[in-house]
Amino acid sequence: MTRETLLDRVIVLLTTAGFILSEKCDIRPRSFDVGGRRGKVFLLIKVLSNIEGLSEETSQEMRRLAVLFSGSPIVVGEHTNDHPLENGAVYLRYGIPCINIETLHDYFIEEVPPLVYAAPGGLYVEIDGETLRGLRESKSISLGELAKALGVSRRTISKYESGMNATIDAALKLEEILDAPIACPINMIVKFERPGPAAQTPNDLRNASELEKDAFGALMHIGFDVYHTTRAPFNALSREDNNKVLTGVSDVSEVMLKKARFMSSLADVAGTYSLYIIKGAHQSKAIGNTVIIESEELKKLDDSDELLELYRKEPRKADTGK
C-alpha cells in the first residue's frame, strides 16, 4: 500500500483506540506525521513504507521533541529493505521503536504487547531470568538437565537466568519445556530522559536564520528557553517553567498560514500554547488557537506573563486562515 494509505489506516486505528489526534502534517520537512494523546500517553507518529528511510537526523529530532513534549516517538512501517516487518516484533532504529500496523493494533486495541525484537542475526526475546530460575527450581530441574534438553551449555542457561536475551527459537523451546511463559513484554512507550548525543541545548541557534534569531532573542529576553528545530512543522519549541509554546517564525505566506493551522491542531492535542511570530502585518490576531504577533510587537513585551496574557485576550478560533 502507499504511505498515505498506511497513514490513513494508522489514524483510523488510533482514533478507534481512543486517541485524540492532530491534523495530518503535510508540511515539509517533517520529522513526524501526526501527534496523538490518550490520557497521559502522548505519541509522535511517523509513517514510512520502508523503515530504513528513517534518517539519523530525523530520528534525533523525534527523540528531542519527545523529551520536550514528555512523549514517545513511534514509527509505523511495512518493510525493512526487502523484508516485511514481522507481526508482534519491534525493530529499533536509532533507539526509536518501529512496528507494522498489525503490531500497533495488538498493542493499542487488543492490549497485547509485543514479545519479540529484531536485531542483527534474527529475532530475539528478553528472558525474565527470575521467572526462568523459579520455574526450573520448582520443577526440580538442574541447570545441566535444562541445558541438555535445550541443546546448549549450562553457562548459557545460567546467562538466561541472569537476564541474557535469547533467540525466539530458544525461548519457545524453554517455554515448551517449562510449560509457562518466560518472555518479558516490550513496552513501546519509550521515554527518553535526555536528548540524543547530537541534540541541541536550549538557545543553541547556530543553524537559525537571521529572522529566527531575532524572534528567538526576543523570547529569550522575556524568560523563555528556545529549542530550535530543523525538520519539524514549526521553528522551535519554547519553554518557560511549565509553559510550552510551539513557535513559528516567517514572513506572511500561504505556507505560514498552513503551519499556523497545523500548530493549533497539535497544540490542542499536546496541551501546549501555539505562537506564530511574523515579519510584517496580518489582519488576524489568531489562526485557530495559534496567536499571531508581529516581531516588533514581541520586542515590546517586558516578561513572559505579557505574552501568555495574549492567549486570554485573543478570541479562540478567530480565523481559520482560509
Image (tube, rainbow, N blue to C red):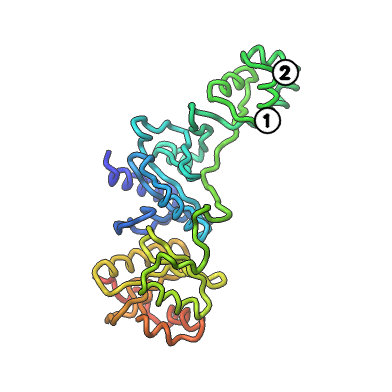
Compared to residue 306, the image places residue 322 above or below, namely: above
Q: Position of residue 156 (x, y in %)?
A: 66, 22
Residue 317 as seen in the image, left or right of residue 225? left
Element at label 2: helix
Instruction: Provide residue 34's location: percent of width, then percent of height.
Output: 38, 54
Left or right: 146 with respect to 201? Answer: right
- Residue 298 visible (yes or no): yes
Residue 140 vertical placement versus 243 (above, below): above
Crowding near the residue tagged with mark 1, few <14, some 14–19, many ≥20 C-alpha atoms within 10 Å = many
Residue count near mark 2 (Cα–Cα under 10 Å), binned few <14, some 14–19, many ≥20 = some
Residue underneath mark 2: 143
Helix, strand or loop under label 1: helix
**Residue at the location (63% across, 30% down)?**
164
Question: Which residue lies at the image location 52% right of the left edge and 38% below the top edge?
Answer: 113
Residues 200 and 139: in front is 200
Asked whether, in this view, residue 172 is left or right of residue 236, the answer is: right
Q: First in sequence: mark 2 or mark 1? A: 1
Q: Quadrant of residue 145?
A: top right
Instruction: Give the quarter of the figure containing the C terminus.
Output: bottom left
Above/below status of 221 relative to 185: below
Q: Amino acid at mark 2?
A: Leu
* Residue 268 seen: no
Using residue 47 as the reference point, say whether residue 305 is left or right of it.
Answer: right
Tell me, for residue 305, which label it has, or none: none
Report the amino acid beneath label 1: Gly
For this rendering, which residue is in front, 233 or 283?
233
Q: CA distance from mark 2 to mark 1?
A: 13 Å
Which residue ends up furthest to the front in the rendered image?
206
Name the residue that disc number 1 marks.
129
